Image (cartoon, helix red, strand yellow):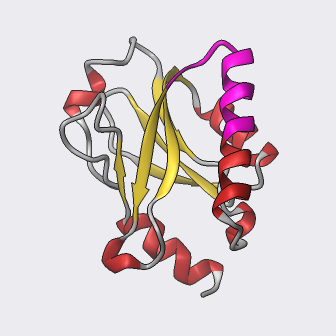
Amino acid sequence: MNFSTNLSLYEKTEYRCDDKLSQPIRIGEPHPELDTLLDEGTGAVFITAASPYDQKLTDTQNHNRNELLKLKMAIMGLEFYDALGVPPQGAWQPEYSFLVINTDVDTGITLASEFEQYAFVYIAKGEAAKLVLI
């Protein structure tokens, strides 16, 4: 698969954080339940460090990358929760990810760039989820 194919799948992926949300986040849709967790003027970032630039890595490599992302977010003082990106029709294995709340799009860009991601999901309070391309 190439990036444009994956981009279409990213848009159809369900972004789940079962510990905090009863329904998944979907691109193009608002998420009122998530809004209740967000402070005014903030948003949420849904991000992974797995599969840099869509490269297939081993489970161990992806796990290690996500542990580094988790450490980075903790050092930055971010509030985050374990999450899972579940693609449609088994396009790939669900990816261990994080839901970062009360943050901004610039933080998402910084993390996605550092961890070699083409995109991440951003949800501003009161708005629909969108895919942000790096």
- Image coordinates of residue 45 in percent, x first then y, are 51, 36
The residue positioned farthest toward the right in the image shown: 114
Of residues 16 and 126, the one nearer the viewer is 16
| Residue at (67, 63) in percent of width and height | 51
From this view, report whether residue 102 is shown above or below residue 86.
above
Main SS, magenta region, reads helix
Above or below for 84 versus 10: above
User: Could you tell me which residue is drawn at 43 percent across and 55 percent down?
Assistant: 85
- Quick check: is 69 in the magenta stretch? yes
Does the magenta portion include 92?
no
Q: Residue at x 60, y 87 (%)?
A: 1
Q: Nearer the viewer, residue 60 or 105?
A: 60
Q: Quadrant of residue 11?
A: bottom left
Left or right, residue 85 beside residue 77: left
**Above or below 104: residue 30:** below
Percent x, y for residue 89? 32, 79
Q: Residue furthest bottom?
A: 1
**Left or right for 102, reference 25:** right
Provide the residue span drawn in magenta: 67-80
Corner quadrant of residue 88: bottom left
Q: Residue at x 39, y 68 (%)?
A: 87
